[in-house]
Image (tube, grey):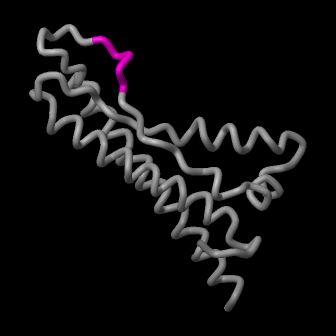
Amino acid sequence: MISTDAFSYINVLDKAADASWTRENLIANNIANADTPGYKRQDIDFQSVLKNELSNYKYMNLDQKMNAVDLTELNPMVYTDHGNYSYRLDGNNVDIDTEQVELASEQIKYQALTTSITSEFQRLQTVIK
């Protein structure tokens, strides 16, 4: 984590990419345990954490919000989805089709985040030259 206003947006993107990577691993773990009796799927929700943090700065533009965001508050927690009811007799609540769609979606999101981080660094390099 870099502590200067020039990197505020990159720091937030970095936190989002970390959460996306964690979510990919959780979804892959869910898929791997699709046949484990009693297994409950796990997930992480970074979007709600980021939305909550940004809502603290209602009357600012995006650049000001990125500078004001408290990065220590952008730490989503892994949760177990007990509310997702299972139609299976063994109590496992992993729907393999849903998990595969979520994994593909998360992979695209991760690629977009890493591309955005790369673009931000390229912009900074252009300014430095």
In this picture, is 34 found above or below 128? above
Residue 8 placed where, x, y %? 70, 65
**Residue 91 percent location from the top left of the image:** 19, 15
The residue sitting at the bottom extreme is 129
Identify the residue at image location x=83%, y=56%.
Answer: 64
For the C terminus, give its image quadrant. bottom right
Figure check: 119 above or below 71: below
Residue 7 figure quarter: bottom right
Residue at 58% across / 76% down in the picture?
Answer: 122
Q: Main secondary structure of the magenta part?
A: loop
Quadrant location of residue 50? top right
- Residue 98 percent coordinates (x, y): 28, 25
Q: With 44 as the anchor, is 67 left or right in this view?
A: right
Q: Return the residue nearer the eye: 115 or 54.
A: 54
Residue 74's place in the image compared with 51, above or below, is below
Q: Is residue 110 magenta?
A: no
Q: Nearer the viewer, residue 64 or 46?
A: 46
Which residues are the magenta region? Answer: 81-85
As drawn, 125 above or below 69: below
Residue at (33%, 46%) from the top-left corner?
24
Q: Is residue 28 left or right of residue 107?
A: left
Q: How many marks?
A: 0
Q: Is residue 90 left or right of residue 78?
A: left
Q: Which residue is depicted at the point 83% across and 44% down?
A: 57
Q: Quadrant of the N terminus?
A: bottom right
Q: Nearer the viewer, residue 61 or 58?
A: 58
